[in-house]
Amino acid sequence: MKLFGSVGIPLPATLSRSHVRRLPRWLPDVVFLLPALLVFTVVVIYPVLSSLIYGFTDWNGISSTTHFVGVSNFIRLFSDTKVRAAFGTTLLFTLVTTVLQNAIALGLALALDHLIGWLRGVASVLRVIFLIPMLLSPLAIGYLGQYIFSPTFGVIDNLLIAVHLGRWARDWLGDPRLALGSVIAANLWQYVGYNMIIFLAGLQTVPRDLSESARVEGASDRQQFWHITWPMIAPATTISLILTLVGGFKVFDLIFAMTNGGPGYATESLVMRVYREGFQSNHFGYAAAISITLCLFIFGLSVVLLLLLRRREVAI
Amino acid sequence: MQWRTPWCNLSVTALLIGILCTILAACGSTGTSGQSHITLTFASWQGGAAGDAYQAVIKSYEKLHPNVTIRYEVSDATNYTTILNTHFSAGDSSDIIAFSPTSYNKAPYVKAGDLADLSDQPWVAHLQASAKVTAVADEDPGKSYALPVVQDMGGVIYNKDIFSKLNLQIPTTWSQFLQVCAAIKASGVAPIAVGAKDGWPLEQFLYNELVNTVYRDDPGFHAKQVAGAATYTGSTGWRQAIDNLVALKPYFNAGFSSSTFANTGDVLATGKAAMTVNGDFTLQPTETSNPNIHLGIFPLPYVQGSSVKPNLTSFVDVTLGISAKSQHVDTAKQFLQYFAQPDVMASFLTQRQGLATLDNVSSYKVDPALTDALPMLQGQSVNEAVIGTTSNVETAMWKDAQAVLTGTMTQMQMLQDLDTVFKS
């Protein structure tokens, strides 16, 4: 069969191999990249660049006129108490979810990886079960969460009352001390399965003979984990941590559906503040400035973390 | 391939031509009157029973104008401003748009030139004074940009059966009101239902306080704010209203922070709560849930002595504007003109259970729960329009009131925040 270059696409009968040889070598790459690049430009690059421009204006999102305001939007956001509070909430959410989500996911992945014999079948079923919440939309999880944590109709409080532990029943989403924790719990439930799959993939790369020879040498399970498994799954850990971190800073939909940022500002994330400034208060220029700053912050933090974790991988 | 005979090719060509003709015919289909078919979109946040009243007007209009279809599209009330802004920004706003003079103000869209000028419409001459202020532009009171369709009143909506069972009288002073709340709480019923999660029901509490603490004696407070001569922080009346809201917290339903407006209706309808503070639009869904309930309305009595009578709030709930960029401005105007006809409006108000905005509409039924309070509209009510809050101040008010009630913000911080937002 005649092939187009080396990519395996059948050639029309009229095109001979000599014709193909006369084509520039870069042409197939460009032809294949162009559609994706066009879509990417329209839906990502253009909005990002226009946000960058709007960040220096006072555009209200409706008016056809706008004024250049220099860096005043960027100066303002550092003294805005609501932005600072939202940043604190987002940071707390991200730190807690990054640590807990990865710790629980690693624990589950190790447990499933260690199942042997007929239990391997059970492990396969459990993998799918743990992954199901991830397949649902965060909005759906959020609305489910609203009902699960409701003090009137919620499963948790009604269950506590049913088992005579009514004194532990709480307004989980209405109490500012508990609301963020409840959102974090829902977030963990949704994404732990996803991180678990990343760790499971990492665990597949650990050579079995290495673990077996360690066991023969008398290494305990804990020693095997810290000296063999943990270093060997470093690449998976890097990916899992970075994804959780970036996801944490971008959290919006789950909070929007569960608490709408409330009560008050108790669960308002930075992206939610962007939404309020832009779409509810008609401060699109200011909202763009916050989102650009957040984007740069996430980028910087990801690069630092990636360098640190990669260094650890190389050291291993 | 074997099946591709000349006959077969001919059949395929004929089929394709047929499909093409059908598509072209559909694009240019004509109504019975010979006019091309027009589809209008109508954006609103009012669904449920209130939405049905608008749908009924639409259906009767469509019956008379078979070449027009009006799609009534309901959006979530909490995010309605967001949705409007997004559509206007994208240049694909609905043809007819519902606004609220308080929560979803038309002012920014008028300023941006996004709404059609309706000043020449015949119904403008019939607007009642209280409705006219919501139809005109702030900058130019000579121009009208929206048809106000329904007025409401707000106050304490209460369950008459619970009051009579506990032998309670309608309170006329703040101390009496707190005593009534305490008596209801002692009976095991939540005195006041509030859907604080939605935010806007808390604003209704504040408005019902403010018409007594600020705007009764100082209706020009908003004008002073605009002129820079008054602030929320400097107003003892605003401070008092927020303090009173906090004072009522022990009497709110369990889990009020995570309850929504819909939950409020549920707990009222089931008799788990005795009162709520909101607009009379709360009546219909509650009465639909429990047709045997007997509700009434009285002013939230923030007055210290018995010599001053407390005020109800009154407000135009919905005004209808037309997008200036609509392809069918004239048809949309015709629809509003039809809506404003006395018989159509009367039928709408009877179903929606609200009060008229036009002086030529009289023969409509009002909810029996409003009967006692109707006389108070003259002389014992304040129109919420005087409060003059913009949508960004309102949004901040919702969140701040939640924060104050849950102890994460002080009353003074709330006032300072409102001042900051007002100035921005």
Image (cartoon, coloured by chain):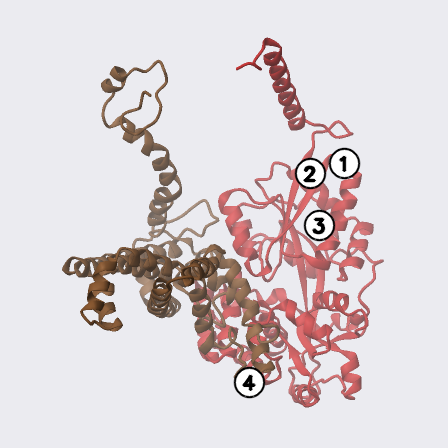
Query: What is the CA distance from the residue labelled 2 to the residue labelled 3?
Result: 17 Å
Residue B215, x across and y down, in percent: 61, 73
**Amino acid at circle 4:** Leu
Q: Nearer the viewer, mark 2 or mark 1?
A: 1
Residue B415, x across and y down, in percent: 47, 74
Q: Nearer the viewer, mark 4 or mark 2?
A: 4
Q: Secondary structure at mark 2?
A: helix
Which residue is disc 4 drawn over? A165
**Amino acid at circle 2:** Thr
Quarter of image, res A40: top left
User: What chain does badge 1 belong to?
Assistant: B
Q: Callout 1 environment at 10 Å: few (<14), some (14 to 19), or many (20+)?
A: some
The chain displayed brown equals A
In screen coordinates, is A275 left or right of B83? left
The reply to whether discs 2 and 1 touch (Cβ–Cβ < 8 Å) is no
Residue B71 higher or lower than B355, as above or below: above
Which residue is disc 1 drawn over? B66
Quarter of image, res A197: bottom left
Query: What is the CA distance from the residue labelled 1 to the residue labelled 4?
Result: 62 Å
The chain displayed red equals B
Which residue is disc 2 drawn over? B331
**Amino acid at circle 3:** Val
User: What chain does badge 3 belong to?
Assistant: B
Residue at 36% in and 61% down? A249
Residue B84, x across and y down, in percent: 55, 51
Which residue is disc 3 drawn over? B124
Query: What is the CA distance from the residue labelled 1 to the residue labelled 3?
Result: 27 Å
User: What chain does badge 4 belong to?
Assistant: A
